Image (cartoon, rainbow, N blue to C red):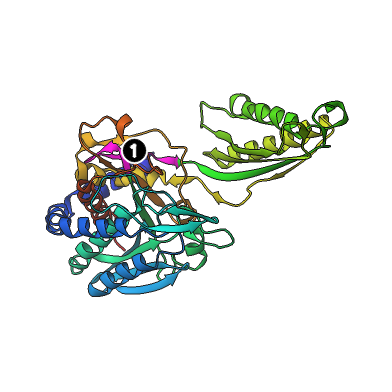
Amino acid sequence: MKKIVLITFLFCFKITTAQKSNYSELIAKKATQIEQKVIDWRHDIHQNPELGNREIRTAALIAKHLQSLGIEVKTGVAVTGVVGILKGDKPGPVIALRADMDGLPVIENNNLPFASKVKTTYNGKETGVMHACGHDGHVAILMGVAEILSGMKKELRGTVKFIFQPAEEGAPVGEEGGAELMVKEGVLQNPNVDVIFGLHLSAGTEVGKINYHPGGTMASSADVKITVKGKPSHGAYPWQSVDPIVVSAQIINSLQTIVSRNVQLTHNPAVVTIGSIHGGNRHNIISEEVEMLGTIRTFSKSDEELVFERIRQIVTKTAEAAGATAEVKLPYSSYNPVTFNDVELTEAMLPSLQKTAGKENVNLVPAVTGAEDFSFYQEKVPGLYFFVGGMKKRQDPDTVGPHHTPQFLIEDSAFLTGMNALCNLVFDYIALNKK
């Protein structure tokens, strides 16, 4: 009992020490001084977006800036990624900070002087390219953080790795990419990373606010491909067929019972969505085959295993009962683990977020069923991933262009909070973990 009390006391003492031995006022001053520079970077990147594994211009901009600060730079990591290493004047932990760089195949519909006009070909079709998820802001924020921290090298105890990651939204078909490839290529090694922090701008959260969730904060995601094969016939003689469209309809309906009847929703939510179904090409022909695509979201490994197994059972047994056959590919082409915020780390660093935005502006929020490949870093080292508000104050969130849409928009005033948060996390973590 005495040992538990002593550990608790020491832990509380370390947090108190961290709160007192920080540089938040100096950081805030430096962030304000470079705010316009960060905004200009964001406008430039927004106007010149690039898709995953194609972020050549963006990477060059980042590398040039880091090199100008005297930071050691590695380029071409995981195709187009950039990694900067800043060694403080004193020994200490190795802290990684991550920003994603890629845009999306979206045609922008915003009346902005820096709106994207970029066109490209994606999956064989001409489309626009847009930073429709805030990655342009993430890059600009981390470039600003690199400038602030490099100017505080004498005060820095430890090493900071700046990870500018390509292809968070997914690599092109047939290519590897994103956080998974960066981890595979050793981004968390040489020197070995002790902890990683990342943020995401939120279009539906007011500027100046920070949202967080300990544990599973964003869902794992896996896509699924289901192919149902039956027996074709003339549409006028259905008794001569094994109709894969009817079988597919039964499968889709039955899949919805997984969440409602198999997952214990009081513990974690889950999602089973079929987003695409294709079969047949004429009104009076019963086709031989139907193909379905969907997405699966869960918040724990046990739930994931349960949902995956139930999908396979329902699909194959429903088809078999109708005299058809079915094939399930799960995951089909992409997979992200749960974005899991280390609970102890989140608790320890919460004061850093609170002093950044004010305690009243830091909110514990429910988990999000979106997914993030930041999770691949968190599988290897403790991590904290949080959300920074990017919406005008007092604006109705229902009037905001959602993420991944042509109307998506982030306010420039959001970047100060992001810079301050990441810098405070670095110095406070160092204070908590003196080596």
Q: Which residues are magenta?
A: 202-217
Mark 1 — residue?
Answer: 401
Q: Dot 1, how many residues are within 10 Å of its Cα: few (below 14), some (14-19), or many (20+)? A: some
Give me the residue at 23% from left, 53% from top.
419
In the rendered image, which quarter contains the C terminus?
bottom left
- Give how far across and how far down residue 111 sits, in percent: 26, 45
Total marks in image: 1
Look at the image and tell me whether residue 65 can be seen: yes
394 vs 406, nearest the viewer:
406
Dominant secondary structure, magenta = strand
| 392 lies above or below 376 | above
The percent position of residue 203, horizontal first and vertical second, equals 31, 40
Residue 430 visible from this viewpoint: no
Left or right of 425: which side holds 235? right
Left or right of 94? Residue 70 is left
Residue in the image at 18% along x and 60% along y: 37
**Circle 1 SS class:** loop
* Magenta stretch contains residue 204: yes
Q: Can you say whether 388 is above or below 189 in the image?
A: above
Which residue appears farthest toward the right when viewing the image? 240
* Quadrant assignment, res 398: top left
What is the three-letter code of the residue carrying label 1? Gly
Residue at image point 44% right, 66% down: 187
- On whether residue 380 falls in the magenta region, the answer is no
Residue 133 point in image, percent of width and height: 37, 47
Q: Quadrant of the N terminus?
A: top left
Q: Left or right: 197 with respect to 372?
A: left
The one nearer the camera, 262 or 63, is 63
Residue 79 screen position, x and y as percent: 47, 68
Find residue 162 and report its image quarter: bottom left
